[in-house]
Image (cartoon, rainbow, N blue to C red):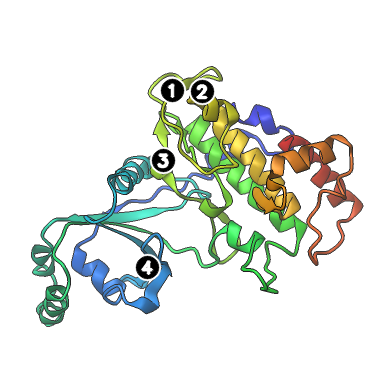
Amino acid sequence: MLTAHFWPLFQESTVVAQEVVPYETHEFTFAEIVAATDYFGPHTVIESARSVYKGRLRDGRVVAVKRITDRQSDSTKRKFHSELDILPQLRHKHIVRLLGSCVTATKDKRLLTNPQQKKKRLLSWWRKEQQEPEWLTVYEYTENGTLFHHLHPDQGSSELSSVTVPWKTRIDVLLGVSRAIEHMHCHANPPIIHRDINTQNILLDANWVPHVSGFGLSLVCDKAMSEEFEMTCPVVGTIGYIDPEYMTRGHVKLTSDVYALGIMMLEVLTGRKVIQEDEQGAIYLKSFAVPVIEAGNIRGLLDTRPVPEPTPGQLRALEHVAQTAR
């Protein structure tokens, strides 16, 4: 079980079971999503590369909408269907909440279901667009973006956040992510392998609570879960976080996610990117951090940005996190 890797640093699996949050998903009409995002206006764009928009539903809920069109790749469409299959099985407080979806090949039919006063405006807008199939997913909105953004702000930025300042928040984020992974591995039936645990897939809400996202590459374990469970499949994921055994042999296991979490723990402790370039080439975080940890120089490992000096108690906790990551 995942807890075997983290005990006593992380709490028992009974806590994870208590953090399950039941909710229902909804099939949205295209018209509802268009109205919520103000016709996918440029001012609603959250992430242009992934076609993610901010919206507000009629009941007042703020949401994030991911939009996939027929022009996008087959792999992108497969990720859409993977999330639709997997996320409804994972209703944990530290896993992003899928509120619903919309799949439409003929959007004019969807538009006709809207109230009469909106129909003319929507149809006028739609005639200006290329008529093609679309796949849309609607998620809860997380106000504070990704963990990656806070650890690695844009060059020249002096931005500090509640993630980069207090050490306690950094460790709380890791605890939340670990519980989400334990839920996927030990409480979901069948178990789920995420395959792309990284800081860009950790979303932070208004209270800096972490939510694991990015389930487009995830796999369902269709056999009884054990430490020996593995599958042979094409290698996918984010370079730097991928389990070396999976990278070289194509064998992915539940522990592949544990490896990625270990890399993320080093990233949170050091504030360094997983791969950095210098004159000699690529420097992998693991190659830098593990020798420092093994030498017992935990202070030499920690992020040097302006954060409060850790107290003796915090330093002991950070050393425990570092040893667990190693």
Kind of residue at disc 2: Arg
Tag of residue 249:
2
Tag of residue 177:
none
Q: Earlier in the sequence, mark 3 or mark 2?
A: 3
Q: Are marks 2 and 1 in contact (CB under 8 Å)?
A: yes
In percent of width and height, residue 65 lies at 35, 63
Judging by the rendered image, the residue that carries numbered circle 1 is 232
Residue 254 visible? The answer is: no
Marks 4/1: CA–CA distance: 35 Å
Q: Earlier in the sequence, mark 4 or mark 3?
A: 4
The label nearer to you, 3 versus 2, is 2
Image quarter of residue 68: bottom left
Marks 2/1: CA–CA distance: 8 Å
Kind of residue at disc 4: Tyr
Kind of residue at disc 1: Thr
Query: Is 281 placed left or right of 199 in the picture?
Result: right
Above or below residue 39? Residue 176 is: above
Judging by the rendered image, the residue that carries numbered circle 3 is 217
Instruction: Identify the residue at horizontal 75%, vertical 62% (top origin).
Output: 166
Above or below residue 246? Residue 40 is: below
Instruction: Identify the residue at horizontal 55%, vertical 31% (top origin).
Output: 256
Disc 3 element: helix
Q: Earlier in the sequence, mark 1 or mark 3?
A: 3
Taking the view exactly as shown, the residue that stands out farthest to the right is 312
In percent of width and height, residue 190 lies at 41, 28
Disc 2 element: helix
Above or below residue 253? Residue 239 is: below
